[in-house]
Amino acid sequence: MKYPKVIRTASSLLVALLLSTALLAQSRDDLEAQRAKKLEEIALTQRLIDETDEAQRKNINYLVILNRQIRNRGQLIVTEERVLKMLNTSIDNTELFVEVLATDLESLKSEYKEMAYHAFKTRSKFDYLIYIFASKSLQEAWNRMRYIKYYNEVRENQIDLIRDTQKSLQGKVVKLKKEIETKKKLISGLQVERQKLLRDKRSKNKILSDLRGKEDEYREKIKEDKKIAKELDNAIEEIISREMAKNETLSGLGSEEFAKNRANFIWPAVGIVSSSFGRQEHPSVKGVYLNNNGIDIRTEKNETARTVFAGTVVHVVFIPGANSAIIIRHGEYYTVYKNLIDVIVKPGDVVEEGSELGKVFFDETKGVSELHFEVRHQTEKLNPLLWLKKK
């Protein structure tokens, strides 16, 4: 006995599209998260730029932050272009969804018409009884009863399929319209970011041009800064060496707990990295290299420095020209927070993650508020960016 055909909207093409769309959505969510973080950093950097007065926009410190913003905008544009590419793919998939669903809907309606016409011809219950009683055997009668039951179920299912397909089609059309609108906004935003990037690059070139005649002056200033940094570094190393020589257990979490939290520490201050760890060329004076024992974090004015992990304050050092530096012990590890004023901790204090240490010094002459932060294992200097949470 031939049973009626059942139409299924979840064709192999639709299944493939669903899988593709799910993977695409996940990747796009990751990109959107990256984009949101980059926008936050751009907003913070822009606030630092806006706080810089006109006179200070001609020095190296401003150039550093401008370089950072140029890099931020470049990274944002790359991310947004990737989002746009995925959005185009998503729009193509959605359009294909709409096309397939529309075709399925027409097929469902067409088949239902055939069912309705057949039902009209055999609409009388007496006709069904005649059909059953005309059987030549009990087995055939049983089969005919099963066929009638199955046929009625198919008709009901067909109605449900039509309704579900119509609803799905309407949803996809709404989604398509939203995605097209999002695409328009994204393209418009990209154009704005490209214009801002060009503006920042022009500002950078102007500053570099103005600084060319001041290289000798900056070389002398770099020597002075290096001398102060060396003096402070020697003081820190001497303090840590004395602490190691004591060979005593201080309160606070030990080395193992500290090491386990690598790449998961909170940031010691809200800001942007203006100078990375290690040896790097000076931003404007060619041939001059600087060696950074930690990282420098450019902050807004009156920013508070905080501990990245629980430990014990072992020393507070003051160096003229470098303000105060706080050294905190975490077992065999140490963290250093430099360029602070209004320090509120003292040696022997047990601190928790996020405890306030003091204010980051704001240099009125430079228009800069900058925290220097280090991580050390005994006297070995480590890259702090490998220990802090990724932004």
Image (tube, grey):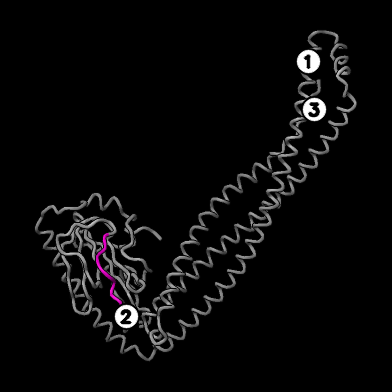
Compared across the picture, whether 329 is left or right of 268 comes to: left
Q: What residue type is labelled 1?
A: Asn
Residue beneath disc 2: 288
Q: Specify the quadrant of the image occupied by residue 326.
A: bottom left
Q: Are marks 2 and 3 in contact (CB under 8 Å)?
A: no
Residue for point 85% across, 33% down: 114
Q: What stretch is highlighted in magenta?
A: 355-363
Residue beneath disc 1: 143
Kindly give the residue lying farthest to the top in the view shown. Answer: 137
Q: How far apart are marks 2 and 3 (CA)?
A: 84 Å
Kindly give the residue lying farthest to the right in the view shown. Answer: 121
In which quadrant is the N terminus drawn?
Answer: top right
The x and y percentages for residue 348 are 14, 60
The x and y percentages for residue 336 are 23, 65
The residue mark sitting in front, 2 or 3, is: 3
The local secondary structure at tag 1 comes to: helix
Q: Distance between the residues labelled 1 and 2?
A: 94 Å
Tell whether position 362 is magenta: yes
Label 2 vs 3, first from the N-terminus: 3
Residue beneath disc 3: 4
In which quadrant is the C terminus drawn?
Answer: bottom left
Q: Which amino acid does label 3 sit on?
A: Pro
The x and y percentages for residue 103 are 77, 44
Q: Residues within 10 Å of mark 3 (few under 14, many from 20)?
A: few
163 in relation to 313, above or below: above
